[in-house]
Amino acid sequence: MRKKTYFVAISAENRPFPLFFCTTTLLARVAKRWILARMRLWVLFFFPFSHRTTMLSYLQRYLLPPIFAIAIVLFCSSTPLFGQKWANDLFYNRTHNFGTVAKNAPTEYRFELTNIYNEDVHIASVSSTCSCTTPLIEKKLLKTYEKGAIIARVNTERFSGSKGAKLIVTIDKPFYARVELQTSVYIRSDIAFSPGKCEFGAVPEGIKTTKRIGMSYYGSDSSWQITRIVPTSKQISATAIRRGWHNGRTRYDIDVRVAANAPPGRFSEYLNIYVSGSSKPLPLRVMGEVNSGATVSPTAIILGEVKSGEKISKTVVVKADTPFTIELIRCDLSNFTASTNTSAAKKVHLVTFEYLATSGEIGEQGSIVSIRTSLGEKEPEFTIHGSIK
């Protein structure tokens, strides 16, 4: 990862200072000499020889400092980006257009930033010029190469129409700077989701899960309809079911599905819903977490050499991210029995099995043991293998 070079170490403690401070000092010296030269010419032109030395000394002592200070202030205020480019470079982008969203639909965007400097970056505060957007700081202190975000959350439940907000981020370390982030959105007051987003919560791995969301259109157009739904991921899909139009309201039910082959972990996707009369989609957020099915450890048990008539007992651990129960244990070997430590729903179960070797099973023996749980169709398995003498 590249490091920015706006900071250079010039102090005795090897502390970094902005490069533009050094440049400003050099320009200040040049400006001071230029102003002083013009003063000398002015004194030589307007004053007699006997008063030139006294007048020049007076101007240097009382007139030059305020003129010089005013010039520096005007210079710094006229070039704000020169001193804040390092702060702007922290952000990947500083503008975002939410597009068109429905009433009550949770709408937010993360303005991501990375500290690409040697010094710690501290975000003191963030404010918004419009109450339609609430800004939040994800992480105030960023070490070198640490990531953070400024979250812009649109209050769609209280506002409608075209809205824009400017988020002002104030940084006080390593140096003072302000960064402006711009957002824009159009909130449709005639369309609403109920609830505003599709939250699945915990979804078992390997099972297709469905959740229903209501959508309403408030208007006199009885032919209004959902034309198509485009998901942002193949792991989710949706079907729109029209419920009819009555008293200026068109109702739809949207059945949102999470695919059975969805990978374990959290997911946050969108359904882009296209409606008649508009070319811009309405986003519906779909969130949840696919919990991995139960796993067994160890996955292979070696019995070794077993004498006929000998009984072998082993224990395996079955666990999952969510509480579950063990419903059935299957094995092809005869004289195989298994039991669990509890019948209650738990995240961890101990399964103890016993195998009695008989004279009728002399030689190599092995089987796959399957464990059916309440989490779904995916069954954890382990193998056992041994030799009976």
Image (spheres, rainbow, N blue to C red):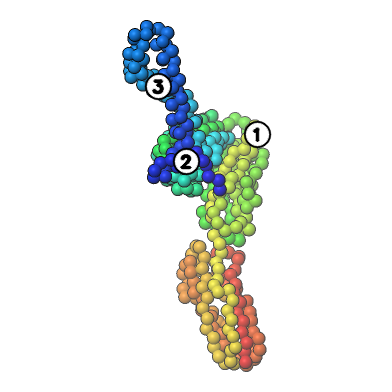
Disc 3 crowd rating (10 Å Cα; few below 14, some 14-19, many 20+) is: some
Q: Judge whether 281 appears above or below 387 on screen.
A: above
Q: Quadrant of residue 95?
A: top right
What residue appears at the point 58 percent right and 89 percent down from the top-left corner?
306
Label 2, label 3: how far apart the Cα atoms are: 27 Å
Task: Give the SS element for disc 2.
Answer: strand
Q: Is residue 249 visible?
A: no
The three-letter code of the residue at mark 3 reads: Phe
Which disc number belongs to residue 279? 1
Pointer 2 residue = 8
What residue appears at the point 57 percent right and 43 percent down from the top-left corner?
284
Nearer the observer, disc 1 or disc 3? 3
Mark 1 or mark 3: which comes first in sequence? 3
> Between residues 326 and 177, which one lies in front from this camera angle?
177
The quadrant of the image that shows the C terminus is: bottom right
Disc 2 crowd rating (10 Å Cα; few below 14, some 14-19, many 20+) is: some
Q: Is residue 88 visible?
A: yes
> Between residues 14 and 37, which one lies in front from this camera angle?
37
247 sits to left or right of 229: left
What residue appears at the point 62 percent right and 89 percent down from the top-left corner?
388
Mark 2 or mark 3: which comes first in sequence? 2
Task: Give the SS element for disc 1.
Answer: loop
Mark 1 or mark 2: which comes first in sequence? 2
Q: Quadrant of residue 375?
A: bottom right
What residue appears at the point 55 percent right and 56 percent down from the top-left corner?
265
The three-letter code of the residue at mark 2 reads: Val
Residue 28 image offset from top left, x and y in percent? 44, 26
Which disc number belongs to residue 68? 3
Label 1, label 3: how far apart the Cα atoms are: 58 Å
